Each structure stands twice: as C-alpha cells, then as structure tokens.
Image (cartoon, rainbow, N blue to C red):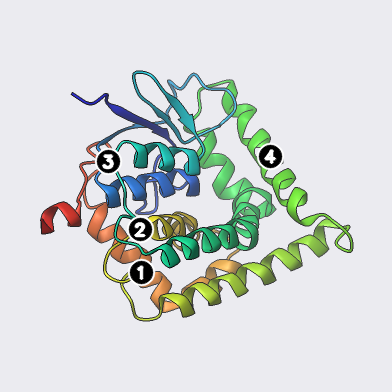
Amino acid sequence: MAAPLELSCWGGGWGLPSVHSESLVVMAYAKFSGAPLKVNVIDNTWRGSRGDVPVLTTEDNFVSQPAKILNFLRKQKYNADYELSARQGADTLAYIALLEEKLLPAVLHTFWVESDNYFTVTKPWFASRIPFPLSLILPGRMSKGALNRILLTRGEPPLYHLREVEAQIYRDAKECLNLLSNRLGTSQFFFGDTPSTLDAYVFGFLAPLYKVRFPKVQLQEHLKQLSNLCRFCDDILNSYFRHSLGAFSCVNRKSAAD
C-alpha cells in the first residue's frame, strides 16, 4: 500500500479551497493528476513558526515549495503532463518562469504590501487561523518576506524607490495577464482539453486575485476584464473543487475517461 500523502496548507474563503497561491498550485495539480492527498488545513492548533507552506509529508519524506512537491508527485506516477509534447513541456517551463517573474510580485503586493488590503483583509484572515501569540507575529513576518521577495527581483537600478517598483510590477503583471489571455484564447485549458502543470500554476496565481474581496483592486479589475481567464478559474473550481476541502476526493477526468 502506498504511503499516505498529506498536504499542510492554508485554508479557503471566498469560494476558494485555499486563498494562498502556492497552496492552490499544489492542490490543483493533485486534482489534475489524481494524487490522493489528505489535506491538513492550518488552524489554531498549528505548531509551525515560519509560514513555510504548502508542505507535503509522507512516511519518509518532507517536501516544501510547489515545484519540488510537483516533482515528487510525478516520481510517484501522478503526472498531469504525460500527454504533452516536448515543445509543450518547454512552453510550460517558460510560462511558469514568466508567471513568477512578472505576475507573482504584483500578487504578493496586492495581498501583503498594499496597506488597505493587508490591514483589512490579509492580516485578519491569516491571524485568525494562527495560534496565539504567533498570530501577533507571523502575519507581519510574512508581509516583510513578501516585500523582500519583491525588492529582490525588482528593487534594482533604475527602480530605487518602492513607488517606482510598484508602478513597474503592476505594468508587468497586466502585460502578463494579457499574454495569458491571448494564449488561452477560447480553449478550455492551455494545452487543449486536458489540464496540466501550467494550468495548475495559472489557476493558483489567478484564483485568489480573482475571488478575494479587496478594497484596493487595481490588478483585480484588470483580470476581470479578461473574461476567458475568469471563466478558466470558474471552470476549474466547479469541475475539481465541488466537494469540501476536508474531503479533497479527486475528480480526475483522465481516470473517468479510461
């Protein structure tokens, strides 16, 4: 019998199984590949101290970071990309790099750096799910980590000041969204009728941006003008996340079709 696969991740809200992009990437990939994950949602009994989630645990392994978790699942024969050509595999890597370079900084800024969003939505939501007294410390630590991650990739000459960095990351993010919208077109998924790793990443990055209700919605408003990307997120939510997060029983179209 295969060792159980347990995923520790941030929980959901606003109609999402998780409000955390990196957790959503792994959860979506598991759905697409049929990996039987047991999801452990972080709550007030959590014993972590750094917020380094998602984390996949088995009897013999402890794996963090979405890319490493997905690679581990592929080695366990849960592969959402087996129908892709070599060219499509290369395109997947290129688009994921684009997402992490051009879109992720703006997503992090929207959640963790934009003051109104952080104090009215992000901080209260995360603090309510973290045990005291860590709830007083960890959200601020995660906010600083997000800012440092943004500045690490964007705070170079000639963008010396945060305001200049902010303007640039939102321009880059809107261009990235436009590119994704053009690439998706009228297709159900990015490589046709079957979801793959790229779909998991795009969904993970876009769905929280699309669904969470923020007071400052600059990037969210742009996303909502791209109807095919919104439809893409809604279709995945309706097709793969109908059941409760706790149950997390995979709706695997490939298995159903066999």
**Amino acid type, residue under disc 2 in the picture:** Ser
Rounded to the nearest angstrom, the CA distance separating label 3 from label 2 is 13 Å
- Contact? badges 2 and 4 (CB < 8 Å): no
Q: Going 48% across and 80% down the picture, which residue do you hit? A: 182
**Amino acid type, residue under disc 4 in the picture:** Gly
Q: Residues within 10 Å of mark 2 (few under 14, many from 20)?
A: many
SS of the residue at dot 2?
Answer: loop
* Mark 4 or mark 1, earlier in chain: 4
- Contact? badges 2 and 1 (CB < 8 Å): yes
Q: Residues within 10 Å of mark 1 (few under 14, many from 20)?
A: many
Q: Going 81% across and 56% down the picture, which residue do you hit? A: 162
Label 2 belongs to which residue?
Answer: 196
Q: Position of residue 43 (x, y in %)?
A: 42, 28
User: Nearer the observer, disc 4 or disc 1?
Assistant: 1
Q: Which mark is residue 57?
A: none
* Mark 1 or mark 3, earlier in chain: 3
Rounded to the nearest angstrom, the CA distance separating label 4 from label 1 is 34 Å
**Amino acid type, residue under disc 3 in the picture:** Ala
SS of the residue at dot 1?
Answer: loop
Label 3 belongs to which residue?
Answer: 35
* Mark 3 or mark 4, earlier in chain: 3
Q: Which mark is residue 191?
A: 1
Rounded to the nearest angstrom, the CA distance separating label 2 from label 4 is 29 Å
Q: Going 46% across and 36% down the picture, which residue do you hit? A: 54
Q: Is residue 10 left or right of residue 257?
A: right
Q: Is residue 173 left or right of residue 83?
A: right
Q: Which mark is residue 145?
A: 4
User: Nearer the observer, disc 2 or disc 4?
Assistant: 2
Residue 248 vs residue 87, the one in the foreground: 87
Q: Is residue 25 above or below residue 176?
A: above
Q: Is residue 64 left or right of residue 176?
A: left
Q: Going 64% across and 58% down the picture, which residue do you hit? A: 101
